[in-house]
Image (cartoon, helix red, strand yellow):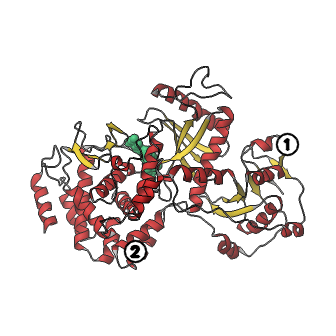
Amino acid sequence: FVLNTIHCKCIVNIKRLKRESDIMRYSNLAGAEILKDYQTFAQMIKFRQTEAKKSVIIKISEISHIEHLKKFCEYYAKIVNVFPYNTIDNNRFVLMECNSNKDVEALREIAVCKADPEYAHCVTPFFLYKPRLKLYTNQNTVYKDNYGYHSNFGTPNLNKINQSLKKIQSVSNQMIFLYDTLRITELNTRLRFYTATQISYYLSQLFINLSVVPFGSSVNGFGQIGCDLDLLCKTNISSNDTAGWKKFLFMTQVVPLTDRIEQKHFLDLIGTIIKTCMPGITDVKKILEARVPIIKFRNLSTNMQCDLSSTDMTALHMSELLYLYGQLDWRVKPLVFTIRKWARSMNLTKENPGQWITNFSLTLLILFYLQTKHILPSLTSMKIFSNKSNTIDNFDWFLKWKNSVSNNDESLSKLLCEFFEYYCFFDFKTHALCLRDGITKLKRDASPLYIYNPFNPSLNVSKNVTISELLRLVGHFQRALQIMLNSTEQDTLVKLINFDSNSTINNEFNKKNKSVSISEKFIPNVTDTNNLQKIEKNIIK
Ligand code: GTP
Ligand code: MG
């Protein structure tokens, strides 16, 4: 066997290679741990991190090698899950979950670097598996069936989605279908945590109190296939425990960095380490002058596009809040997925941040709207983010709310339509959204779109959105509302998520939208009010 490690791509040997017949005898599969129904954010993170630490990634050249590889590994370790997948550049890998860390160690043991046997213990497990014997050929389909071979790194094909949507009768069911199709898969979640754990492992070899955790849509329940992996560098000591520790020295502790300049320097250093020392990482870019300084890079074996930052813990608390909201009512996620998909198709949100609304701010718009419908509670009424650390400690409250009978049982379709309507007529000129209290409040400054930061009311989450982008957004809310009111159930979602320039509604919209269509009453600095009145009349009609 020839194995490559991720670290140096050198040739390694496998110790104690057994005959195939021996290997076949050791094929006991242990039962995989099952993720419980209700988990706090902290429990979920811990569960996934533990799972990642018990996993290895193995590179294979042929899909037909999987069965043989599994049997071989089972001789040395208890394997509980096998996930074959390929990356966008068509490399084939297997994510293999072992029963315990000891099993991972056992697999590391069998890969010994020729040049330096000690070296193998330091590397994150990642092998290239090439059996010399040609075993199990011509059985590709069997492997596909057994293991569900994954190649889902690109976003699902829009044509296929459209075809499926057309076969589903009700808009509500179409929204549930969209959610099921677009959300991150089990394998993808595992690869995200694996990536974070791997980077955490390397950095912790240099900074003993540093760990890297995923946040954002990878963990908040609103992640779509292909979304970026947001990573946070976290120091594991309290902010007042700084005495005596020198910063930025190998094998030392890093004090929590509160100062922006310090954060930038620290990220600069981390970026250099990632670029020069970490195997399997490519396209490293330091973006240190942005509002939130980040290091961008791609992990080759997991095919993850990563954004590493070192801000305070607010981003993690924000992920926890969104995670909780997503769990409170079954309608939240399908609604958010549908609106996010719609916004992306309309080019209202974009891959890179800029003057337009982000997925995050858009999600807050949706959650606020659901607060006004009494489907979701305000933060203050939850009383669970009141402790100093901002983390949820009252899980009983969560279960109570979830199990309480909601007065609002509106369908997904109705909620979607009313969402568009709500923001078509929202007074953006003077009012801001406050999710903390679940009510609108006066704006604190002239920002076109004002969403109070739930954890820091002195900040506006959507400060980046310009007036023209807000006008475009509201214009599209109006267009979406028109579609919802004028289309048959079967056509609605297809029309919403496809900007089909041939459709009558879109032609109308394009013509009208040449000068932006929203009332001066609601939006500042708009000159063409005639246009708005026409559209408003249409909507009311
Ligand atoms: P995707 O577009 O799927 O990546 O959604 P996302 O929720 O991951 O958004 P993004 O990658 O832009 O940001 C990652 C996380 O950073 C968000 O989930 C928030 O927790 C946080 N975040 C993003 N923008 C802001 C902001 O303007 N203010 C604050 N306080 N946090 C933000
Ligand atoms: Mg993200």
Residue 179 % position (x, y): 44, 65
Side of 515 where 281 appears, left or right: right
Hey, what amino acid is under mark 2?
A: Leu
Q: Residue furthest top?
A: 244
Quadrant assignment, res 344: bottom left
> Can you tell which quarter of the image residue 474 is in?
bottom left
Q: Is residue 272 depicted above or below 192 in this figure?
A: above
* Position of 189 relative to 8 (above/below): below
Label 1 CB sits under 8 Å from any ligand 2 atom:
no
Q: Residues within 10 Å of mark 2 (few under 14, many from 20)?
A: many
State the quadrant of the N terminus.
bottom right
Q: Secondary structure at mark 1?
A: loop
In the drawing, what numbered circle is on residue 165?
Answer: 2
Residue at image point 80% right, 62% down: 74
Query: In the image, what residue occupies the spot 82% across and 55% down?
Result: 2
In terms of depth relative to the viewer, which is nearer, 50 or 339?
A: 50
Q: Nearer the viewer, residue 215 or 530?
A: 215
Q: Residues within 10 Å of mark 1 (few under 14, many from 20)?
A: few
Mark nearer the N terminus (2 vs 1)? 1
Q: Quadrant of residue 171?
A: bottom left
Residue 442 x/y as whole percent:
20, 41
Residue shown at the point (66%, 63%) measured from the top left: 83
From the viewer's perspective, is 3 left or right of 464? right
Residue 407 makes an appearance in the image: yes
Kindly tell me whether residue 498 is visible in this rendering: no
Residue 511's disc number: none
The local secondary structure at tag 2 comes to: helix
Residue 264 picture location, percent across and down: 50, 29
Q: Name the residue that disc number 1 marks.
A: 117
Q: Amino acid at mark 1?
A: Pro
